[in-house]
Image (spheres, rainbow, N blue to C red):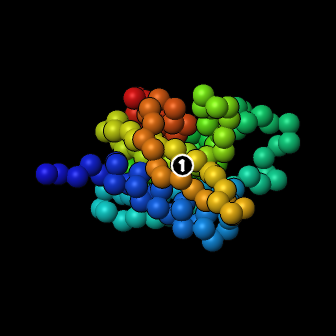
Amino acid sequence: MTSDPTLDLLKRASWRCEVLFKQRGSLRTVVWLTERLDGHREQIETGCTSATPAEASKDEVLAVLPAEMRADYAHAGVVRFGCAYPATEHTANGRCSCVAVEAHDDRGHHAVGLREVFRRNGRPMLGALELASASIGRYANLLGCVTA
């Protein structure tokens, strides 16, 4: 039985965001895990900075980000990446806070999951990773692949 490297990366990204969430009580950044062809792995965090023009909308920022990251990833030889970021899930009971987790590779494999944020005894916690449709992923095209 062979493992799915993209799904494995999704699980690693989910675990890493859980560690940070437990340390901080929330996740306010985007956690990125990258993997190069030679197997080298790297983790970085990005967040909103004052370098983003105040008048830029979220959609405008997300329109520019993929091109810049695609170029960075191509230069670094990234063949697979995962990320986790704060999101809002729309359910039958309304909206709820969650952490979205994605993993994508340069061959068009995609995996996406959600972890609901809930409170137990007043303390924020993450629910279990639930796989979701890959079509809801924000970053599927960063490696220049067609989205699922």
Q: Which residue is mark 1?
A: 115
Which residue is situated farthest in the left direction here? 1
Give the amino acid type for the residue marked by disc 1 in the picture: Arg
Q: Position of residue 21 (x, y in %)?
A: 61, 63
Total of numbered circles in the picture? Answer: 1
Dot 1 crowding, Cα within 10 Å, few <14, some 14–19, many 20+: many
Which residue is situated farthest in the bottom direction here? 23
Q: Residue at x 17, y 51 (%)?
A: 2
Is any part of residue 143 visible from this angle? Answer: no
Which residue is situated farthest in the front direction here? 121
Q: Position of residue 128 (x, y in %)?
A: 48, 52
Say if 143 sits above or below 34 in the image.
above
Residue 130 located left or right of residue 52: left
Is any part of residue 16 visible from this angle? Answer: yes
| SS state under label 1 | strand
Say if 110 sits above or below 49 in the image.
above
Say if 79 sits above or below 120 in the image.
above
Q: Residue at x 68, y 63 (%)?
A: 121
Q: Position of residue 13 (x, y in %)?
A: 47, 57
Q: Residue at x 45, y 36 (%)?
A: 132
Residue 48 located left or right of residue 106: right
Q: Position of residue 55 (x, y in %)?
A: 85, 36
